[in-house]
Amino acid sequence: MQKISIIIVNYNDQKWLKKLFDSIKSQTYTNYEIIVVDNDSTDNSVDFIERNYTKAKLYRSKNLGYGNAANTGSKQATGEFLIFLNPDIYLEEDFLEKVIKEYNGISEKETFGTMGVLVYGYDKQPIPKKNYDCYGGTIDIMAVGYPAKKGKSIIFNGGSPFFIKRDLYLKTGGFCPNIFLYNEDTDFGLRLMLYGYKHYFCESTKFYHYVGGTTGAYSPKKIEWYIVGELNTILNNFNWLLFISLPVHTCFFIAVLLFYLLSGKMEFVKAILRGYKNIFTHFGKILRFRRVVQANRKRSDFVILKRMHYGLSRITIDSILTRIKS
């Protein structure tokens, strides 16, 4: 029986943990381990886990963001496969069993990248297909993720949860260490696609997600993270598309900055400026990461272009997500 390492990145998410852990304990597939990486929580998460879930391997870390914590967990894992779970989700009882079965049915395992799973709302209600037909993700010209349609070639699977071989995750560098939060899954999936790997999707089981449960509502901090994540994704992965993507992204956020400036919302103005400052401050690290990606890619930007969403996802995605309430 193949072993799965379940990696949970936690930051002040005690209120979600019981439901998630209980859904893991009820799995029909039993060969798994649980690894929790705590990003310096200030609530009672750590004590709660230590008291109630003693079999979980708990690692404490400074808060260096989701991707870096996930990378820490992957290095400690002993399973053949990794599954990353946010605290604000819970699973069907057959989740692990069906994902493993789906993987074992794939013939081209040497090019297997990741596997995504169907998402429902936290109240178990299906997400309206006409609004959020999510079978993996694609991106727009700004490297913002957008739900992919069923049957279409996808660019990435969402980071919680997705299923991947541990060796592949480590070999390809895991989540980009320069992204604190948001777009780390988009960047990683795009990188794997450029390296020649394929993404798959499992419809035979599902998980339930309280969208925004762990990160909260739209805020200045979120817009800062969006900018950093999107620009890292563009700079890491695009080749000639850079010359289209960067001007579009810059013009878009100049317009947003002016809107907030005229509206007197200076906290959002400062957040946008901090996002761009982050890119300039860490530009050397970003270039080093980019060189690795570009040296190992096997596919051109034309492949990205063929799978791209033609529209600006940033304008529409927030209105879509507001419909997924639990």
Image (cartoon, rainbow, N blue to C red):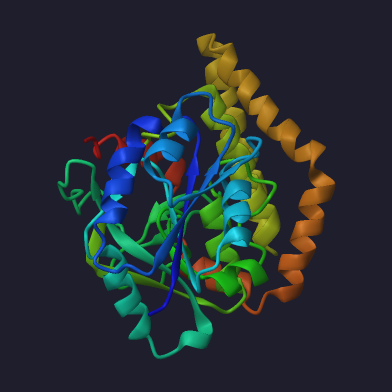
Is 299 left, or right, of 120 in this rendering?
A: right
| Quarter of the image where one finds residue 248 | top right
Is residue 245 positioned above or below 296 on the image? above
Q: Is residue 267 left or right of residue 117?
A: right
- Position of residue 63 measured from the top left corner of the image (x, y, whole percent): 63, 35
Q: Is residue 204 above or below residue 69?
A: below
Q: Is residue 244 visible?
A: yes
Quadrant of the rendering where the N terminus is positioned: bottom left
Position of residue 210 in the picture relative to residue 295 (left or right)? left
Tell which of 181 and 132 is nearer to you: 181
Q: Is residue 300 above or below residue 208?
A: below
All told, the count of numbered labels is: 0
The answer to which quarter of the image holds residue 298 is: bottom right
Question: Taking 295 as reference, is 129 above or below it?
Answer: above
- Front-most of residues 167 and 184: 167
Single out the residue that lies furthest toward the right: 284
In the rendered image, residue 177, in percent from the top left (x then y), is placed at 68, 50
> Which residue lies at the image location 41% right of the left edge and 78% below the top edge?
2
Q: Residue furthest bottom?
A: 107
User: How far across and how far down the image is residue 278, in percent?
Assistant: 73, 35
Q: Residue furthest top?
A: 264
Looking at the rendered image, the quarter that the C terminus falls into is top left
Q: Looking at the image, which residue is at 45% across and 26% down? A: 44
Task: Name the residue at 24% across, 68% down.
Answer: 203
Where residue 168 appears, as percent x and y from the top left, is 59, 73
Left or right of 240: which side holds 54?
left
Residue 243 shows in this picture: no
Q: Residue at x 31, y 63 (%)?
A: 149
